Image: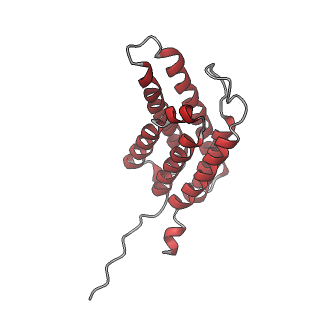
């Protein structure tokens, strides 16, 4: 039981919950300047960058360079995702045949995948355990599908609706890739 409480997936998930909460409470400069391209929700990416960088440093590669790259890629991925979603929804898809109500879902899905793959690439660059197809597919799928929460952040005007589950799932999946495989306990024989 104790080893499960110390598993990277659980530790990174808890840190990501804190990161997502901080990111929604303190998004940073540029969070209200949409839809122009630029730096948006800067601190949301920074908080999550610290989580991913910490995970890579603790369980992937004890190198400050590896942690810095994971941090940077996560922050860049976050900015890429936010800007990509805004540009898709507010500019590129306006003239498309996609109904307006669906453009935000499409934007969230694509941007969630883009942010997830960038985060994964930065973490996997120095953490060989993350270079498995199952980790890549899991992280990108989680990022894309949880990106579908984007319309709800607009409807309820609270970023935590997207940030907390997205960051928690991506961090937990990275932690699963970084940590030892959990083996189910054998049942007691009668």
Q: Seen from this angle, which residue lies furthest top?
A: 95
Residue at the left extreme, as displayed: 190
Residue that protrudes farthest toward the bottom in the picture: 190
Q: Which colour scheme is used?
A: secondary structure
Residue 17 appearing in the image: yes
Determine the residue positioned at 67% across, 51% down.
64
Count of numbered circles in the view: 0
Residue 25 lies in what quarter of the image? top right
Residue at the front extreme?
A: 156
Does residue 97 sit above or below 102 in this rendering?
above
In the rendered image, residue 163, in percent from the top left (x then y), is placed at: 57, 42
Residue 95 on image: x %, y %: 45, 10
Image height check: is 99 above or below 60? above
Q: In this view, does 131 lie above or below 59?
A: above
* Image coords of residue 152 (percent x, y): 51, 35
Position of the C terminus, as image quadrant, is bottom left
Task: Kindly identify the residue that appears in the image at 49 percent across and 15 percent down.
Answer: 92
Q: Which residue is drawn at 68% across and 35% down?
A: 42
Between 154 and 117, the one nearer to me in the picture: 154
Residue 96 vertical position relative to residue 85 in the rendered view, above or below: above
Q: Judge left or right: residue 69 versus residue 147.
A: right
Residue in the image at 32% along x and 84% along y: 188
For the question of whether residue 67 can be seen, the reply is no
């Amino acid at each position: 039981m104790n080893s499960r409480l110390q598993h990277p997936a659980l530790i990174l998930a808890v840190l990501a919950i804190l990161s997502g909460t901080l990111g929604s409470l303190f998004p940073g400069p540029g969070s209200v300047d949409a839809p122009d391209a630029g730096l948006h929700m800067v601190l949301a990416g920074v908080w999550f960058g610290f989580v991913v960088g910490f995970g890579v440093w603790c369980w992937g590669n004890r190198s400050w360079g590896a942690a810095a790259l994971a941090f940077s890629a996560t922050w860049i991925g976050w900015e890429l995702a936010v800007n990509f979603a805004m540009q898709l929804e507010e500019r590129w898809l306006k003239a498309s045949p996609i109904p307006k109500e669906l453009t935000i879902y499409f934007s969230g899905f694509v941007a969630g995948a883009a942010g997830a793959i960038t985060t994964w690439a930065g973490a996997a660059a120095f953490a060989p355990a993350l270079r498995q197809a199952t980790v890549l597919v899991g992280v990108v799928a989680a990022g894309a599908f949880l990106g579908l929460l984007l319309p709800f952040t607009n409807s309820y005007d609270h970023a935590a609706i997207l940030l907390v589950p997205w960051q928690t799932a991506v961090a937990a999946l990275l932690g699963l890739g970084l940590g030892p495989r959990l083996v189910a306990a054998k049942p007691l024989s009668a």
